[in-house]
Amino acid sequence: MVVSVVIPVFNEMRTLEQVIKRVQAVPVEKEIILVDDYSNDGSRELVQSLGEQPNVRAVLHEYNQGKGAALRSGFAAAAGDVVLIQDADLEYDPNDYPKLLGPIGENDADVVYGSRFAGGETHRVLYFWHSVGNRFLTLLSNMMTNLNLTDMEVCYKVFRREIIQSIDLKENRFGFEPEVTARLARFRKPDGSRLKIFEVGISYAGRTYDEGKKIGWRDGVRAIWCIIRYNLF
C-alpha cells in the first residue's frame, strides 16, 4: 500500500524540514506532496528544494488561497493507494501513521479519522476554549451527519484515493474539515453502500499563537456555517 502524504504549507519555515524528516522516517511506502500556498518566509524556496528528493513532489500556488485549496491541489496530484493529510507544523506525530493506516490496510475502513479526544495518547495542555469549541463543532456536525465522531476538526484524516479524488470540494480555508465530513457522510460507493469510517486515538502537541497557530474564532464561525450549508443544502 502506497501512501500519498499531502502537506499544505504556508509560512512554516521553522518546522517544515523537521516534519519531513519525521514523515520520511515512518516505515511505510510513501510519496510526499508539498503544496506551498504562496509562503513569504522562505518556505516556498524550501519546498522547491525538498521537491528534489526522489519521493517528494512540490506543488506551488501562485497566490495565497488557504488550507482547503492547498489540500485540493495535493489530492489532485496524489497517486498512492491512500491519501493522508499531514500539517507542516509539529502538532501531529507521523509515528501515528501505522495506527491510522491499520483499518484501511486490513480492509475494514474506507476512511480513518484521528482523534485528539479518544484513547490514552499524550497531549500538550493548552487552550480550554479551543477544546470546547472543537467539541461543540464536532457535536453539531454529528447531529447533521448522524456520525459519532469525537474530533471532526482533527488534521489527521486518511482516505482511499479514489474516494477523495471523486469528491468536489469547495472550501478554501479551514471550512474544509466540516465540508469533507458532510460529503463523506453522504457518499455512496458504486454498489450503493455508505463508506466505512473509523476513528483512532492519536497524540497531539498543539502549538500556541506565538508558535504560529493560525486558526481563529472567525474560522469557528465559518465552520458552523459550513456544517449547516453542506449538510442541509
Image (tube, rainbow, N blue to C red):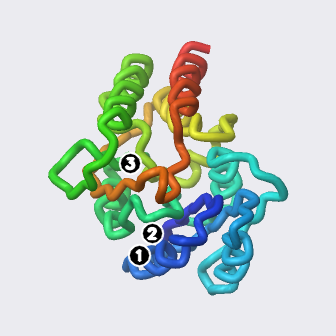
Give the answer, above or below, for where 233 lies relative to 118.
above
Q: Residue furthest left?
A: 120
Determine which residue is flagged by label 1.
Answer: 28
Q: What amino acid is at disc 3?
A: Val
Q: Which is more toward the observer, 202 or 102?
A: 202
**Residue occupying the point 64% across, 62% down:** 11
**Could you say which disc has been placed on residue 180 in the image?**
none
**Pointer 2 or 3: first along the chain:** 2
What is the quadrant of the C terminus in the image?
Answer: top right
Q: What amino acid is at disc 2?
A: Met
**Residue occupying the point 67% across, 62% down:** 35
**Pointer 1 or 3: first along the chain:** 1
**Pointer 1 or 2: first along the chain:** 2
Left or right relative to 114: residue 72:
right
**Residue occupying the point 45% across, 74% down:** 23
User: Can the viewer see residue 207 in this picture?
Assistant: yes
Q: Which element type, helix, strand or loop, lies under badge 2?
A: loop
The Cα–Cα distance between marks 2 and 3, rounded to whole angstroms, is 15 Å
Determine which residue is flagged by label 3.
Answer: 112
Q: What amino acid is at disc 1?
A: Val
Q: Which is more toward the observer, 83 or 92?
A: 92
Q: Give how far across and how far down residue 226 sits, in percent.
A: 57, 25
Q: Quadrant of residue 97?
A: bottom left
Left or right relative to 188: residue 171:
right
Q: Which is more toward the observer, 26 or 168?
A: 26
What is the quadrant of the N terminus in the image?
Answer: bottom left
Give the answer, above or below, for where 28 lies relative to 96.
below
Residues at badges 1 and 2 in contact (C-beta under 8 Å)?
yes
Q: Tell me if mark 1 has few (under 14), some (14-19) or many (20+) residues whose alpha carbon lies within 10 angstroms of its own.
A: some
The Cα–Cα distance between marks 1 and 2, rounded to whole angstroms, is 8 Å
Q: Which is more toward the observer, 163 or 169?
A: 169
